[in-house]
Each structure stands twice: as C-alpha cells, then as structure tokens.
Image (spheres, rainbow, N blue to C red):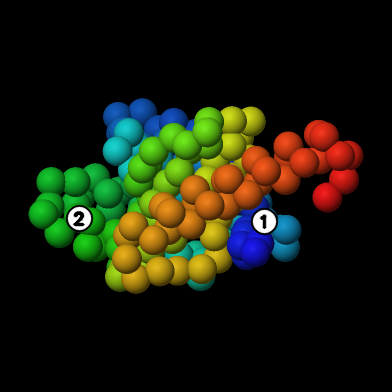
Amino acid sequence: MATALKVIAPGFCVKYPKTPWSVIYVEDASGKFNFRLSSRDFKFEPRDRYRYPTHEAAKRAALCFLELLKRIERSRMRMSILLEIGILKFPRQTYHSYEIWLLIDRTRYSWEVITANGFCFRSQRWYKSPNTPILKAKKHIDRELAVYQIKNVVGWV
C-alpha cells in the first residue's frame, strides 16, 4: 500500500556568521516563502502558518527566529519552546543509502526520507510512538526499491 507523501522543495541555503545555524529558504507552489533552520544536531521548521509573501519578509522572520534561538540556546526549556512553534527533525539512521529523519511535533511523530540525490519525501501521517515512523519509513524505502527493480527488469509496473 502506498504511503501519502509530500515532496519537500530543496530551496537555497544561507549560512549565518557567528551562529551554528544555516537557513534554507523555500518558495512553495503558491509563490509564498518559508524557511527551515539547520544545525549540526537537529533541524527546525516553523509551522505551516509561517508563510511569507516575499523572500525579504521570510528573511526578516528568519533573523527573528535566529535571535530567539540565540536567546534560548542555554535554556533547559529550549526543545519544548521550539516544539510549540514548529517541528523538530532529528537524524535517525541511513537505510539503503536513504537518510531517515524523525519528525517531532509536540506529542506526534512522523518520518522524512532524503534520497542519495537530494530528493526529500515526508509522510503526511503522524504516529503516537517514536518507533512507528522509523519502521514505516523502512517499509516505504523497501517498497520503492522493489518497484524500481521491477521496472528495471520488466519495464513497467
């Protein structure tokens, strides 16, 4: 059974000096901009309601988020504050040359897979246990590999 997926646009990345964060700006199909923040340990993505009409507006908002991150950097409440305003992504493992990321949204969990050539697929389903999305991601990867192999042998699926 196919999983409901969403393709995530790659966008373009800007590394800000004096911070461990990179900002990835993405323009979606409707022409609105959003951004994602990336560090060594995890990635942060503001909720869907944070969409901006222009790149400049997204850039100003990203700078505000970077300022917030600088202020709460040493706080023990940092993760819970970030979970209230966005989605946290943690790398879990590499499986058949695919990177599997665990997405956390308050008390829900999902998965995101990044292929070797940079495509990013995200499940649109959320789960209550953190182990379930990883298993679902592995099943999805196995299915995609099987379909690819069948296409190579037979020529169609």
- Up the image or down, 128 lies above or below 72; here it is below
| Residue at 72%, 63% in the rendered image | 30
Residue 87, compared with residue 143, is above or below; it is below
Depth check, front residue: 125 or 139:
139
Q: Which mark is residue 78?
A: 2
Mark 2 and mark 1 in contact? Answer it, CB < 8 Å: no
Q: Position of 141 compared to 149: left or right?
A: left
Query: Mark 2 and mark 1: span between their CA atoms?
Result: 28 Å
- The amino acid beneath tag 2 is Arg
Report the side of 39 relative to 81 (left or right). Answer: right
Does 96 appear above or below 109? above
- Residue shown at 36% from the left, 28% from the top: 17
Q: Is residue 141 above or below residue 131?
A: above
- The residue carrying pointer 2 sits among few (fewer than 14), some (14 to 19) or many (20 or more) residues within 10 Å by Cα, namely some
The quadrant holding residue 47 is bottom left
Q: Secondary structure at mark 1?
A: loop
Residue at the (12%, 52%) spot, across then down: 75
Q: Judging from the image, what secondary structure is the residue with disc 2 in?
A: helix
- Amino acid type, residue under disc 1 in the picture: Asp
- Quarter holding the N terminus is bottom right
Residue sitting at x 83%, y 50%: 157
Residue 67 makes an appearance in the image: yes
Label number found at residue 28: 1
Q: Residue 92: x, y in percent?
A: 36, 42
- Badge 1: residue crowd in 10 Å (few <14, some 14–19, many ≥20): few
Q: Is residue 11 visible?
A: no
